[in-house]
Image: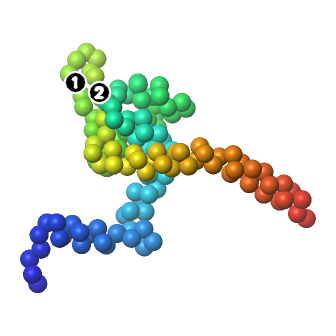
Amino acid sequence: MPTQTASQRRKARESDYNVFMKDCPSRKLLDKIGSKWLTLVLITLSGQTLRYSEIRQEIAGISEKMLTQTLRNLERDGLALREVTASIPPRVDYQLTPLGESLVDPLLTLRSWAEHNMGAIENAQRRYDAAETNTP
């Protein structure tokens, strides 16, 4: 068996990922990306460094628990960095990694699609619901 470079090994591993396969780890990643909180936090952090309280102010309705959990998940997955500055009280800043920034454009496209098409979706839901209530 010929020796492979690191790049060749990485490329071989990437071709092993297929979201249509039951045990593919990329399914878990898609599940995370589908989280509204992860999406909103990533978009909020895009291109800037923010403190926890600043992120929370930007995202209406997010609880402290969900924000903390989301930030920890982003950090664990290599999508965000947490920087603690020694002070009283300690200052904690968050920013996206290059990997996290690379996810922002697809999420912004999805956000735009959702905002642009929400009226059509609501109309379709009303038509469907009306037809369901009229079906014996």
The residue drawn where x is 80% and y is 55% is 127
Identity, as a three-letter code, of the amino acid under mark 1: Thr
Q: Is residue 77 visible?
A: yes
The residue drawn where x is 35% and y is 26% is 51
Residue 62's x, y, as percent?
51, 33
The residue drawn where x is 69% and y is 46% is 119
Asked if the residue at tag 1 contacts the one at tag 2, i.e. Cβ–Cβ closer than 8 Å, the answer is yes
Q: Is residue 117 left or right of residue 52?
A: right
Judging from the image, the colouring scheme is rainbow
Residue 99's x, y, as percent?
29, 49
For numbered disc 2, what is the local secondary structure? strand
Neighbour tally class for label 1: few under 14, some 14-19, many 20 plus, Cα within 10 Å: few
Residue 5's x, y, as percent?
11, 69
Image quarter of residue 82: top left
The numbered disc on residue 85 is 1
Neighbour tally class for label 2: few under 14, some 14-19, many 20 plus, Cα within 10 Å: some
The numbered disc on residue 92 is 2
Identity, as a three-letter code, of the amino acid under mark 2: Val
Residue 13's x, y, as percent?
26, 69
Q: Is residue 9 left or right of residue 31?
A: left
Please identify the residue farthest to the bottom as the structure is shown: 1
